[in-house]
Amino acid sequence: MICGLCGDPLIKKPLLNSKRIFGVFVASVFLSPLLIMIIFVVNDFSKEKPPNNSDSLVLLTFDKSWKI
């Protein structure tokens, strides 16, 4: 194949090479703890139950109010 703009011959490169495979591996190693942490935080919030005590419920509603 020849480039339509400059006329130079085009060289076909392989889709997967060693640098790309190593880069994907290193990126997955660095991102896996973050993904695991997000999964555990989402599971923790889904297991959290609202308090049954009405006094603590009143305190929660007053603590989260915005004062301007």
Image (cartoon, helix red, strand yellow):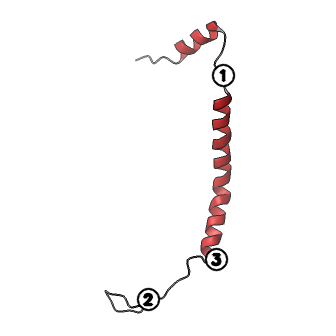
Tell me the kind of residue under disc 3. Ser
Position of 24 relative to 14 (above/below): above
Residue at point 61%, 78% (across, down): 17
Question: Could you say whether the residue bearing mark 1 is in a helix, strand or loop?
Answer: loop
- Specify the quadrant that holds the C terminus: top left
Which residue matches tag 1?
49
Position of 1 relative to 38 (above/below): below
Q: Find the residue positioned furthest to the top.
A: 55
> Which mark identifies residue 10?
2
Left/right placement of residue 6 relative to residue 47 reads left
Q: Decide which of tag 1 and tag 3 comes sooner along the chain.
A: 3
Q: Position of residue 29 (x, y in %)?
A: 68, 59
Tell me the kind of residue under disc 1. Lys
Q: Decide which of tag 2 and tag 1 comes sooner along the chain.
A: 2
Q: Position of residue 24 (x, y in %)?
A: 62, 65
> Which mark identifies residue 18?
3
Q: Position of residue 33 (x, y in %)?
A: 68, 50
